[in-house]
Amino acid sequence: GGFRYVIWVGAPRLKNASMDRGAQLINELAKEEIDKRKNAEFVDSFALFSDTNGNYAASLPVGPSGRSVRVRTSDGVHLTPDGGDYLASQVARVIDDMWGSIAEQS
């Protein structure tokens, strides 16, 4: 058995209210399970794709410039390429932290 690390990326906030509630419930259950485990991390994309008031946001200030870019498609579910890049950068941070932990243990 080799070393395995799980990164669970939760669902982002959704524009449709009933779908959003379902996504939030699944995220809460997944986070509870991930928090019980070693070598596992939960990426909260629900929070990442919410505005400062915790509401759905089609555009967010992301990237080094902090300029607002469209991160969601018009269906209120899917990510735009900029949104995907934003999420990937957050997952990359988790991977960097995980890799640093592995290196310290070696």
Image (cartoon, rainbow, N blue to C red):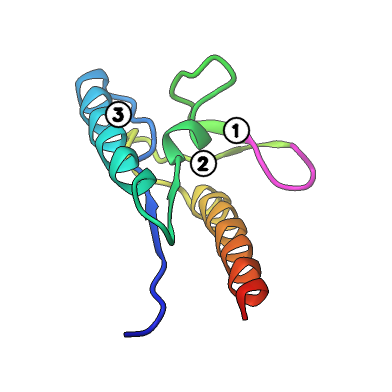
- Looking at the image, the residue that sits furthest to the top is 53
Mark 2 packing: few (<14 Cα in 10 Å), some, or many (20+)? many
> At x 34% / y 46%, what residue is drawn?
36
Circle number at residue 24? 3
3D distance between C-alphas at marks 1 and 3: 20 Å
Find the magenta span and give its range: 61-66
Across and down, in percent, residue 72 comes to: 44, 39
3D distance between C-alphas at marks 1 and 2: 7 Å
What residue is pinned by disc 1?
60
What residue is pinned by disc 2?
71
Query: Could you say which quadrant of the image residue 94 lies in?
Result: bottom right
Q: Earlier in the sequence, mark 1 or mark 3?
A: 3
Q: Is residue 71 left or right of residue 21?
A: right
Q: Earlier in the sequence, mark 1 or mark 2?
A: 1
Vertical arrangement, residue 93 with respect to residue 78, above or below? below
Q: What amino acid type should be assigned to the residue bearing mark 2? A: Val
Cβ–Cβ below 8 Å for labels 1 and 2? yes
Q: Is residue 8 left or right of residue 29?
A: right
Across and down, in percent, residue 57 comes to: 49, 27
Q: Nearer the viewer, mark 2 or mark 3?
A: 3
Residue 17 or residue 22, whichever sits in front = 22
Vertical arrangement, residue 30 with respect to residue 85, above or below? above
Q: What amino acid type should be assigned to the residue bearing mark 1? A: Leu
Residue 22 or residue 17, whichever sits in front = 22
> At x 54% / y 14%, what residue is drawn?
53
> At x 38% / y 38%, what residue is drawn?
12
Vertical arrangement, residue 85 with respect to residue 20, above or below? below
